[in-house]
Image (spheres, helix red, strand yellow):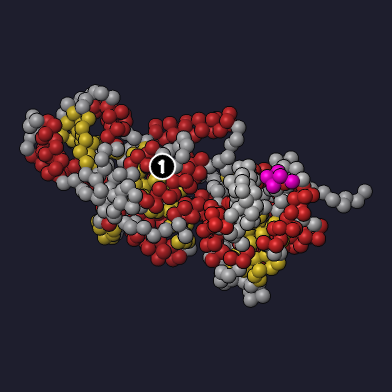
Amino acid sequence: MTVVFKRPHALSDVSMHYCPGCTHGIIHRLVAEVIDEMDIEGTTIAVVPVGCSVMAYNYFECDVQEAAHGRAPAVATGIKRVHPDNFVFTYQGDGDLAAIGTAETVHAATRSENITVIFVNNAIYGMTGGQMAPTSLVGQITQTTPYGRKVETQGYPLNVCEMLSTLQGSTYIERVSVDSVKNIKAAKAAIKKGFTIQKNKQGFSLIEVLSTCPTNWGMDPSEALNWLRENMMHQYPLGVYKDATKEGGADHE
Amino acid sequence: MSEKFLMKGNEALAEAAIRANCRFFFGYPITPQTELAAYMAKKMPQVGGLFLQAESEIAAINMVYGAAGAGARVMTSSSSPGISLKSEGISYIAASDLPCVIVNIVRGGPGLGGIQPAQSDYFQATKGGGHGDYHLIVLAPASVQEIVSLMTEAFNIADRYRVPVMIMGDGMLGQMMEPVTFDEIPPIPEDLPPKTWATTGTHMKRKKNIINSLYLTPEDLEELVLEREKKYQLITQKETRSESYLIDDADFVFVAYGTTARIVKSAISTLRKEGYKVGLIRPITLYPFPSDIICETSKKVKGMMSVEMSTGQMVYDVRLAANGNCPVDFYGRTGGMVPSPDEIIAKFKEIAGGER
């Protein structure tokens, strides 16, 4: 018998707590597949956030540190400076990374910390029940923008990849999506690129993954994927925003 | 003969930490602890260590959390407003049972306050600061030389019990220069537990290590908090420290810590010459507080007085320890003002009514 599909070793053999139709599971799996393929589980340390993926320490088989809300890049900095030859990645949502943790994100990038950041953007605070995120779209209805996000009061969505790509310290910045098989494959390639950059000690990489939240968007999973394609991709175009690896990456050593 | 250096308290804190084998320092500039970070920036690269200036105190303490979780001897330092910012991280460090050392060179508050010496962060240091049921172990040196010995102790206590330890000095201690020797630092004790819990990578040889403080089941969280509480009780038994100065024949005893204790000693010396039988208890650990010696003493004396650079914070602990056995008075200056021996003597005479 040939095994054609199995759980990656780096993904724990437990049930996840994510809502039906949520794309966190896919993204977890992609990260774990990359860890397996690069054979780095034993030298990888994950830093997980506060948000829907707060319990991700139960889902990755490597060593894990749980960070305070928004502080994952700072925690990862501390770990990486102690163990520069280990792989350190953070897994963060949009509220964690782009609101309360904006400073930590920006400065980890400017220092070109040799870490990989997996940034899951679903345009909403999921765990707390669907409040406006920094990445919520203009007009998007959430618990805290019941009449839609208005520019006059709540301002504009924050485009993280665009912002970080302007920094001298960032090495690799790409935005991907997990709405289709094709895009899932591209997302995995991007995550692998991030970890490879870290292996080559080329500095800071961030992979933004557009993700759905059917529960808090009030849609079924298939509608949610359509909404992602028709609305989020407009505000957050996919693509490589910065690739300094050809120049050898940020001067990290 | 031991080699002596003339050093500022802030510099001695840094040098002592390096000699205690601390190789990771994460900081953010703030007066009056500046020289500590500057010293670290200069010295750490020379010993193969890391000095990193973070983007904020919040980031710095979370870097400490990461490095401590990864198994390093790590330190950060700040002054009062910066410690407020670090308090979230300190709560997480305590809740995750991670060892580290935090230095607070206290300045006058609240708010931005001033940059002159104060002891007005006593409540913050000993009663919480961050949220939840936890304690910092708080050490309060009174001289530059004592900084050196307490820094070694701080790292050892942190590693032995897996707790964050704070060294609390006032701005005066940070800035004053005194002769100091590093020759008497004992080696790191061999019986410190190995850091088998650290995130070093599993290397596929053990189960994963998780550094975490999230426990959604109340039964689990209560059990962990109570277990930690037992640890604090053990620390209280084993690590409580104080200095007793001329208390054997005393009928009145001052309680003061840090540089204030030295000022009180000057006052005592004058009062003794005038025939007053006065002494001093100087808490060296502010948490655990030396309640036993204070309680015992309170049974033998006519009165006690807490002298502080605050509006009266430690005095509450002195009163709890004295438990009504004798009156406990208070004298303090605040906002960066330092009490003088004369002021203390005047306050004493007002209380004692000139009775010798």
Q: Quadrant of residue B128?
A: top left
Compared to residue B285, the image places residue B42 above or below, namely below
Residue at disc 1, secondary structure: loop
Q: Nearer the viewer, residue B264 or A69?
A: A69
Task: Point out residue A1 in the picture as x, y percentages from the top left corner.
Answer: 93, 48
Q: Assign the magenta stretch its main secondary structure.
A: helix
Say left or right for A200 vs B156. Answer: right
Residue A218 within the segment the image draws in magenta: yes
Compared to residue B326, the image places residue A94 above or below, namely below
| Residue name at image x 49 percent, y 45 percent | B93
In this rendering, does residue A20 appear at all? yes
Task: Point out residue B226 in the picture as x, y percentages from the top left corner.
Answer: 50, 30
Read off the magenta span: A215-219
Q: Nearer the viewer, residue B196 or B227?
A: B227
Task: Point out residue A178 in the picture as x, y percentages from the top left corner.
Answer: 75, 56
| Residue name at image x 44 percent, y 34 percent | B232
Q: Quadrant of residue B206?
A: top right
Compared to residue B259, the image places residue B177 above or below, namely below
Compared to residue B105, the image places residue B275 above or below, namely above
Residue B301 within the segment the image draws in magenta: no
Q: Which residue is mark 1?
A: B129
Task: Point out residue B321 in the picture as x, y percentages from the top left corner.
Answer: 30, 28
- Residue that protrudes farthest toward the bottom in the picture: A247
Q: Quadrant of residue A14?
A: top right
To which chain does the residue with label 1 belong? Answer: B
| Residue name at image x 29 percent, y 49 percent | B108
Say left or right for A223 vs B41. Answer: right
Say left or right for A244 vs B348. Answer: right
In this rendering, does residue A11 appear at all? no
Q: Nearer the viewer, residue A193 or B47?
A: A193
